[in-house]
Image (cartoon, rainbow, N blue to C red):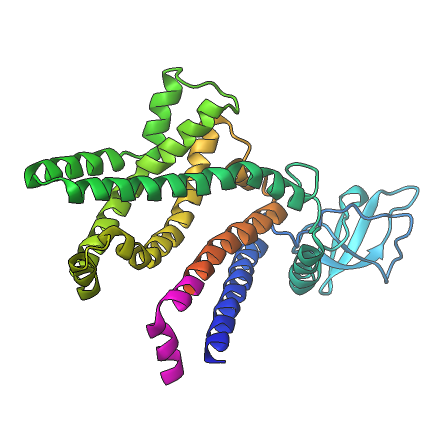
Amino acid sequence: MRTLWLVGQKFGHFAAVLFLSSLVLAVFLWISPGSPGRPTVTLDLSTAQAGVTEACFERGTCGVLKTLPTATSSLLTIDVSGEDVTREGRYAKEPGPAFVPWFLGSFWAGLIRGDVGISESYQEPAVDVVKRGAVYTLPLVFGTLTVAVVLALLLVALLMWLPWPSLRGAIRWALLLLSITPVFILGYVLQNQGVLPHAITVAVIMACVAILCIGDGNLGEMILQFEGEVRHLRSRDYIHAAGLRGASRPKHMLPGLLLPITSVSAAKVAFLLGSVVIVERLFRVPGLGEASLNAAKDGDALLLLTLTVFITGLVALVALVRDLVEIAIDPRVRKAQEGG
C-alpha cells in the first residue's frame, strides 16, 4: 500500500505540474496586449438593444449600450462606468470572455474533449496543429536522446578499456571540445555550405539528429556523467564479488546504470525540445518548433497555450517515468516512504 501511495503521489505531481504551468502561462497571456480576453467579434447591431446589450470598443472600454446608430448618424455610445464613450458603430465589438470561463470552461474542458478551438495562425484546430508538428519533433527528440545515450555509453566503455591514461585524456578532451559547439553553428555549417537541402529527407533527419546529439554539450555532459557513474559502480563490493566469481562485470553494472540513464534522459528532454526549434527552423522541418515561432509571431494565444501544455506534459511524463523506475529498482525509496 505504501508503494501504491508513493506512485499515486508521483502521478499527482505530474498533474499538478501540467495544470500549474498552463495556469502561469495563461495569466501572462491574459495580461499581454494580445490577450485572449480582448473583444474581437464585431457587434451585431441588428440584434443589439440600448440599455441591455453589452459592448466594447477596446478591452478597457466595455459597458452597456446607451445609443445605437440611426439613419442620420453612424455613431454609437457605450456607458463605461458612468462615462459615455462615443465612436463609429462599426468599431463596436462583443465583450471578450472572462478568464475563468476561458481557461477552465473553454481551454481545459476542450482539451479533455480533444478540441480547444481554432488556431489564429493556421485557421484549423489547434490540437491538430500540435499533432502534426509532434509527428516530426518527437522522433527527432527521442531519436537524438537514444543515439546520444548509446553513443555516450560506448565511448565511456572505450575510455575505460583503454590502458593509456594520456590517450584517454586526449580523447575525452577532444569529445568535450566537439560537444560544446552550439547547435546553430553546426546547423549553419551544414546548411550554408549546401550540404543538405531544404526538404524532409532521410539525410536531413539524420543531420538534425547528429546536430542535436553533438551540439550544446549534450554528448559531452552524458560522457562525464556516465563515466562518473561507471567509476562509482566499479568500486562497489558486489561488482568486485562478481569479478572474483568470474562473472561479467558490465552485465552486473547495467542495472545500476539504469537509474542514471533515466535521470539524464529526463533532464535532457527539456533541453532538446528547446534546441529543436533552431534545427527545425534551419532545415524547414514543420515541427513543434516551427509552430511555436508562428504562434508567437502571430500572437496566437490559444496555440501557444496548447503547445505549452503538450511540451510541459511531455517533459513531466519523462520525469514521471524516471520516478517510477526509481521506485521499482531502488528499495531505499520505498523504505524511506514506509519509514515516513
Decide if residue 164 is on the left or right side of residue 31. Answer: left
Tell me, yes or no, whether the highlighted magenta stretch contains residue 337. Answer: yes
Q: In the image, residue 258 lies at what x, y percent?
A: 34, 56
Residue sitting at 65 percent across and 59 percent down? 108
Of all residues shown, which one is farthest toward the top?
A: 194
- Vertical position of residue 202 compared to residue 7: above or below: above
- Work out whether residue 266 or residue 73 is closer to the camera in this orientation and state it: 266
Q: In the image, residue 93 lies at what x, y percent?
A: 76, 49
Q: Which residues are magenta?
A: 324-340
Q: In the image, residue 315 lies at what x, y percent?
A: 46, 53
- Work out whether residue 98 or residue 251 is closer to the camera in this orientation and state it: 251
Is the magenta region chiefly helix, strand or loop?
helix
- Work out whether residue 309 or residue 39 is closer to the camera in this orientation and state it: 309
Tell me, yes or no, whether the highlighted magenta stretch contains residue 311. Answer: no
Residue 276, image quadrant = top left
User: How many labels, in total?
Assistant: 0
Q: Quadrant of the C terminus?
A: bottom left
Residue sitting at 21 percent across and 64 percent down? 238
